[in-house]
Image (spheres, rainbow, N blue to C red):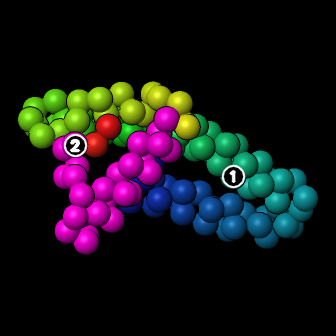
Amino acid sequence: MGTPWAFLGAMLIVLAWAATGPLFRYSDTWQLVINTGTTVVTFLMVFLIQNAQNRDAKAIHIKLDELIRVLEEADSKLLDVEERAAEEQEAIRTTYVELKEQASTGEGPQPSQAP
């Protein structure tokens, strides 16, 4: 649905609807047609977009997991970090923020020594 053809199709529908305005004397029913149509399309697009984002996130996780797996320096305990509790994720994030700050000052352990 994110293609130029989909946009063109939607634009043609709106133009056709607008062109029929005088024919239907800009009645309430004429307005209701476009309002209902856009509401239904918007409602359905929310699910379509969410599905696409979920698939994309899963693919990114798989790719990152593979990179973590093959890199000797990487911490393999991070492979399932997205499935851990929010508190545990926050603790890990805090550790990496501290490591980043230490690396920027040139002191402390390297990221491969993180939890």
- Name the secondary structure under disc 1: helix
Relative side of 11 to 3, left or right: right
Q: Find the residue positioned furthest to the right.
A: 28
Q: Relative to 108, does residue 22 appear above or below in the rendering? A: below
Relative side of 1 to 72, left or right: right
Relative side of 113 to 45, left or right: left
Relative side of 38 to 113, left or right: right
Magenta segment: does it hold 109? yes
Considering the image in quadrants, where does the C terminus appear? top left
Q: Relative to 9, does residue 78 appear above or below in the rendering? A: above
User: Which disc number belongs to residue 25?
Assistant: none
Picture residue at 79% right of the left edge, 70% below the top: 22
Residue type beneath disc 2: Gln
- State the extent of the magenta-drawn residues as a range: 88-113
Q: Relative to 35, does residue 63 appear above or below in the rendering? A: above
**Residue 110 x %, y %:** 19, 52
User: Which disc number belongs to residue 38?
Assistant: 1
Picture residue at 72% right of the left edge, 49% below the top: 39
Q: Relative to 107, does residue 33 appear above or below in the rendering? A: above
Residue 15 in sight in this render: yes
Picture residue at 59% right of the left edge, 57% below the top: 13
For marks 2 and 1, the one nearer the N-term is: 1
Residue type beneath disc 1: Thr
Give the labeled residue for mark 2. Answer: 113
**Residue 113 x %, y %:** 22, 43
Query: Real-space Cα distance between discs 2 and 1?
Result: 53 Å
